[in-house]
Amino acid sequence: MLAAFRSGFARIGAAVLFLHDATDLPIDSTRLCQALQWRVGLYTSVVATLLSWASLRLYAFPRYVVGSALLDTSHLAEIFAQVMGTEALVAAYLTYVGPLVALVGLHYYWFGLLISKATSQLMLRQKVE
């Protein structure tokens, strides 16, 4: 966190934490409804999970967070060039922006897993009833 703050990426780190915490709430409610065997709550929380993932992790995260990290940090080039050199800027981008881009790919993969798990669980529940 201190390195991100020193490199000028603290705003991006805070946005990453917020978006991930916001999408974890519906997942936790899904687990709770499963444990309580509350069917209406389970269906509602599954829909909320899929919607929150689609809107926050698949749309807002790449567009606003990763886009901001790639495009709105050009002012750092001047600061790094004067203070530490361009090698430090390249290292900062590889350290902070590279994993964000990889995380976008993982979000799409995990969303596919969420959809397959949700459909298999809902199909299994329909067969039991």
Image (spheres, grey):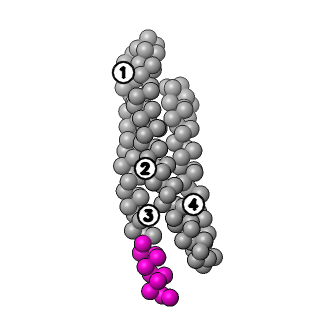
For this rendering, which residue is in front, 10 or 1?
10
Crowd tier of the residue under label 3, counting other residues whose Cα lies within 10 Å: few below 14, some 14–19, many 20 or above: some
x, y percentage for residue 57?
A: 46, 49
Q: Main secondary structure of the magenta part?
A: helix
Q: In terms of secondary structure, where does tag 2 sit?
A: helix
Q: Say what amino acid the circle numbered 2 marks.
A: Leu
**Residue drawn where x is 41% and y is 58% of the image:** 110
**Residue drawn where x is 42% and y is 72% of the image:** 119
Provide the residue designation for mark 1.
87
Structural distance between the alpha carbons of marks 2 and 3: 13 Å
Q: Earlier in the sequence, mark 2 or mark 3?
A: 2
x, y percentage for residue 59?
A: 43, 47
For the residues carrying marks 2 and 3, which lies nearer the camera in this image?
A: 2
Crowd tier of the residue under label 1, counting other residues whose Cα lies within 10 Å: few below 14, some 14–19, many 20 or above: few
Specify whether residue 11 is painted magenta.
no
Structural distance between the alpha carbons of marks 3 and 1: 40 Å
x, y percentage for residue 85?
A: 39, 16
For this rendering, which residue is in front, 26 or 47?
47
Structural distance between the alpha carbons of marks 2 and 4: 16 Å
What is the magenta range? Answer: 119-129
Provide the residue designation for mark 2.
58
For the residues carrying marks 1 and 4, which lies nearer the camera in this image?
A: 4
Provide the residue designation for mark 3.
114
Q: Is residue 92 above or below residue 39?
A: above
Q: Earlier in the sequence, mark 3 or mark 1?
A: 1
